[in-house]
């Protein structure tokens, strides 16, 4: 039986409780919980200890995401504090791994930077935009190394997800961050949309050491001009999984060729799906994943 998990973007407008119930009803074996909903649940006054009874029969395959992993100065301290908070949540929920994403998460900042319209006085977070690639990777690797120490203290791993619009957005860069971090509990979240959108290849995927692939996000996307377009979720990822341009079966087969036997996770940012019945969407995605990975 394939190991199928539902990222809570699949039921985008749900809350923690109905996301869990929907994942169970749709037949998923796991769920990948995400910080906006988790934090909203906790900020409403609920305890994380309320969740394990709801999760019975469902594995929490990972939680995330701690965004903008390359933060510096006082923001770096905030980043590490968030890693600690997420690690504490993970231990209660039984999640084995935390997700870190490169930044800036705001793709409009990247657009403005690349068009030359991002003023020096602009207060929006810009990550390592403008740094040489090696310097940007050094910054990221240093932060990841310290985050990995925090995670390890809780018995957890980390997976990196390079965002397609970021200046740190390639599989090769993620591998270099892992190497420079020098930590054994760091791997990759292999997301088909991010990888495909930036031009990473099936050959690169097939060459990955299977132990570095900590999860696989099955996500679809629309055609884009890689020379001129900045891939963004609101435009290029706004499609129901299976209805886009990514040859998903080829990507699944490339991952399987590595010997990977972990979780396959549905992740979707479709306006159309978001306005449909939660259970129908989740069940459809579960059945699609079953066909793709069986």
Image (cartoon, rainbow, N blue to C red):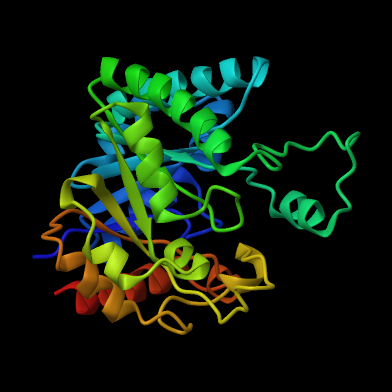
**In the displayed structure, does residue 291 sit left or right of residue 237?**
left
Q: Is residue 160 shown left or right of residue 250?
A: right
Q: Nearer the viewer, residue 88 or 277?
A: 88
Residue under the point 32% across and 35% down: 179
In which quadrant of the rendered view does residue 68 lie?
top right
Which one is in front, 11 or 32? 32
| Residue drawn at x 25%, y 72% as measured from the top left | 252
Could you say where residue 42 lies in the image, as x and y percent from the top left? 51, 28
In the rendered image, residue 112, in percent from the top left (x then y), is placed at 81, 54
Decide: is 71 above or below 191: above
Regarding residue 67, the answer to whether it shows in the image is no
Vertical relation: 290 (above or below) 214 = below
Residue at the (48%, 49%) spot, across then down: 162
**Position in image of residue 238 (x %, y %):** 59, 72
The N terminus lies in quadrant: bottom left
Picture quarter with the C terminus: bottom left
Q: In the depicted view, which residue is nearer to us: 156 or 32?
A: 156
Q: Quadrant of residue 222?
A: bottom right
Q: How many marks?
A: 0
Query: In the displayed structure, does residue 282 sit left or right of residue 205?
Result: right
Identify the image quadrant of residue 27: bottom left
Residue 274, x across and y down, in percent: 56, 68
């Amino acid at each position: 039986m394939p190991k199928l998990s539902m990222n809570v973007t699949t039921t985008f407008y749900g809350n923690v409780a109905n996301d869990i119930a929907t994942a169970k009803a749709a037949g998923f074996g796991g769920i990948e919980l995400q910080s906006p909903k988790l934090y909203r649940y906790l900020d409403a006054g609920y305890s994380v200890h309320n969740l394990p009874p709801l999760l019975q029969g469902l594995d929490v395959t990972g939680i995330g995401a701690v965004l903008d992993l390359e933060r510096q100065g006082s923001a770096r301290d905030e980043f590490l504090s968030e890693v600690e908070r997420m690690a504490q949540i993970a231990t209660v929920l039984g999640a084995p791994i935390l997700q870190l994403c490169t930044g800036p998460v705001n793709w409009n900042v990247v657009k403005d930077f690349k068009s030359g319209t991002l003023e020096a006085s602009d207060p929006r977070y810009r990550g390592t935009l403008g740094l040489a690639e090696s310097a940007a990777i050094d910054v990221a690797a240093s932060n990841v190394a310290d985050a990995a120490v925090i995670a390890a203290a809780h018995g957890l791993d980390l997976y990196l997800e390079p965002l397609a619009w970021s200046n740190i957005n390639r599989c090769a860069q993620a591998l270099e961050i892992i190497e420079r971090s020098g930590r054994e509990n760091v791997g990759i979240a292999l997301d088909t949309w991010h990888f495909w959108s930036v031009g990473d290849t099936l050959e690169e995927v097939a060459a990955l050491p299977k132990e570095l692939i900590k999860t696989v996000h099955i996500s679809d996307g629309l055609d884009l001009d890689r020379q001129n377009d900045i891939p963004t979720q609101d435009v290029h990822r706004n499609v129901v999984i299976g209805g886009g341009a990514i040859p998903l079966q080829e990507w699944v087969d490339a991952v399987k060729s590595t010997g990977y036997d972990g979780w396959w996770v549905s992740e979707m940012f479709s306006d159309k799906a978001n306005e449909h019945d939660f259970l129908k969407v989740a069940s459809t995605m579960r059945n699609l994943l079953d066909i793709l990975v069986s």
